[in-house]
Image (cartoon, rainbow, N blue to C red):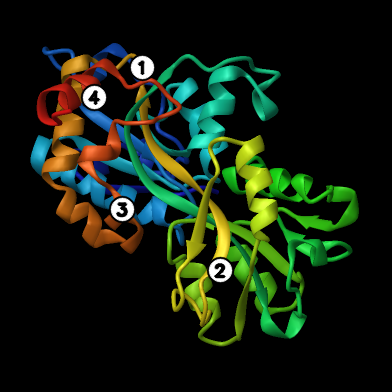
Amino acid sequence: MKRVLLVIGTAILAMSVFAAGCTTTPAKEGNDLNSGGEQKFLTIATGGVSGPYYTIGGALAKVYKEKLDYHTAIQSTDGSVENVNLLENRKADLAFVMSDVASFALKGQEGFKASGPSLRFKAVAGLYFNYVQIVTLAENHIQTVYDLKGKRVGVGAPNSGVEVNAQMILGEHGITYHDIEPEYLSYSETIEQLKNKSIDAAFVTSGLPNNAVTNLQKSKEVAIVPINPSDINRLTATYPFFEKAEIPAGVYQNKQPVPTVAIRNILLVRSDLPNEQVYRLTKSLFENLKIVKQAHEAASQISKKEAGKGLLVPLHPGAKQYYDVTVRP
């Protein structure tokens, strides 16, 4: 069962839906709006509890409660694909999503072909980068992506952004799920399975460092499988949302930087939230960015100057107004 964490608000704690451990916030009705048209309760869809989305989302929820007096909750989810669907169904108000998934949702591609293009979300801000981390144990002697053939591989939770990345990267190396034994696992499940040697390697796409990987290396010698530079060039040419990247030396137990690809994360919001409310949400995020950055090292990459640029998702008019006013060309 996914967990909804109530961040603060005595009145909200009394609501029976959360007291019963409900997994999602119900769709918003008219009585959730105040006289100014703003929604009083905000649910932020994040990710697994050991990932940066969850930690940073908790800090953001606290900011919105303390600075804007909203009742806020964060929801643990399986990641980007689920978060898009929660926004579409009005069961979340803001969500952390990877750029590739957001792009596919807007165009009705990949896993969104059946449902068609998504029209109910806009961007608030570009955030930090998620790095594709192919994690294994040093004793497994997996040195390239091609070595994953015939192996038991964690490919992320079902329909998560991690799984979307895993399929694309494997595919560009000529590897399909028929060539491996795919295991659909969350971050925490992945690490437990690696520790128990139930799987040989796993895709972990997240900000740096990932807490689950950090915990694994306390008891095991961890290795991060590099992506060959020529393969990186092919990936970035095929998928424009991928960028060349490196996992810096020392992030885990790696003595040298590890070449890989990265994808920018986006904070999305429901399209139908009022412009003034989204303006205030955007403004509060950047006025309290120090608090958000203190929550997780990955958030240190967030920059107001760059947050409204180069996004694959159109900005919400309220967010655009904020950047137009505060960020000069």
Residue under the point 54% across and 82% down: 217
- 167 above or below 259? above
Residue under the point 62% across and 19% down: 108
Mark 1 = which residue? Answer: 271
Q: Secondary structure at mark 2?
A: strand
Which amino acid type is shown beneath numbered disc 1?
Answer: Ser
- 136 above or below 282? below
Mark 2 = which residue? Answer: 258
Q: Judge depth for marks 2 and 1 and give the one in front.
A: 2
Alpha carbon distance from label 2 to label 1: 38 Å
Q: Residues within 10 Å of mark 2 (few under 14, many from 20)?
A: many
Q: Judge depth for marks 3 and 1 and give the one in front.
A: 3
Q: Judge depth for marks 3 and 4 and give the one in front.
A: 3
Q: Secondary structure at mark 3?
A: helix
Q: Quadrant of the C terminus?
A: top left
Q: Secondary structure at mark 4?
A: helix
Mark 3 = which residue? Answer: 301
The answer to whether residue 146 is visible is yes
Which amino acid type is shown beneath numbered disc 3?
Answer: Gln
Mark 4 = which residue? Answer: 319
Mark earlier in primary sequence (3, 2): 2
Is label 2 in contact with label 4 (beta carbons under 8 Å)?
no
Residue under the point 55% across and 43% down: 242
Residue under the point 35% across and 58% down: 298
Q: Nearer the viewer, residue 239 or 318?
A: 239
